[in-house]
């Protein structure tokens, strides 16, 4: 993978559902999961997004996307958060978007 981006999550009960939610939110992006025992690295090429709506399908209607922060020990790329999404994107993609916006 040329520009891997995504979260590194501490191993816990929620990890499998979070992986499934990321796969659901990124159907056209191959997602790689690297299990290191104590943590799991989840990554896709250039950009992956996770939405609160998808997480709520797995965890229930009261689940807040900010709960991911307690599990995320690190990440690859640049993180862009809103009240209902987390997007991990490559630095090169972010720089290209900034150049295009400046024109």
Image (tube, rainbow, N blue to C red):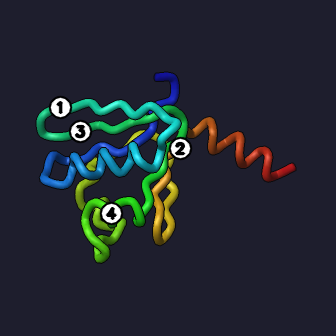
- Disc 4/disc 3 C-alpha distance (Å): 21 Å
101 sits left or right of 47 in the view: right
- Going from the N terminus, do you reach mark 4 or mark 3 first? 3
- Disc 4/disc 2 C-alpha distance (Å): 24 Å
Numbered disc 3: secondary structure: strand
Q: Which residue lies furthest to the right in this view?
A: 103
- Disc 1/disc 2 C-alpha distance (Å): 22 Å
The numbered disc on residue 57 is: 4
- Disc 2/disc 3 C-alpha distance (Å): 18 Å
- Disc 1/disc 3 C-alpha distance (Å): 6 Å
Label 4 vs label 1, nearer the camera: 4
Q: Residues within 10 Å of mark 1 (few under 14, many from 20)?
A: few
Q: Could you say where residue 92 lies in the image, as x and y percent from the top left?
A: 62, 35
Q: Residues within 10 Å of mark 4 (few under 14, many from 20)?
A: few
Q: How crowded is mark 2: few (under 14 residues within 10 Å), some or many (20 or more)?
A: many
The numbered disc on residue 40 is: 3
* Above or below, 4 relative to 39: above
Q: Name the residue under label 2.
A: 89
Numbered disc 4: secondary structure: helix
Numbered disc 2: secondary structure: strand
- Going from the N terminus, do you reach mark 4 or mark 2 first? 4
* Above or below, 66 relative to 97: below
Along the viewing direction, whichever of 31 and 66 lies nearer the viewer: 31
49 sits left or right of 38 in the view: right
Q: How crowded is mark 3: few (under 14 residues within 10 Å), some or many (20 or more)?
A: many
Numbered disc 1: secondary structure: loop
76 sits left or right of 20 in the view: right
Q: Name the residue under label 1.
A: 36
């Amino acid at each position: 993978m040329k520009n891997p981006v995504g979260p590194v999550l501490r191993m816990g009960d929620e990890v499998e559902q979070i992986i499934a939610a990321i796969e659901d939110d990124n159907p056209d992006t191959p997602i790689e999961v690297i299990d290191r025992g104590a943590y799991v690295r989840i990554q896709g090429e250039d950009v992956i997004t996770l939405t609160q709506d998808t997480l709520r399908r797995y965890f229930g209607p009261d689940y807040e996307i900010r709960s991911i922060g307690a599990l995320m020990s690190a990440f690859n790329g640049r993180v862009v958060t809103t009240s209902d999404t987390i997007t991990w994107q490559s630095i090169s993609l972010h720089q290209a978007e900034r150049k295009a916006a400046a024109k």
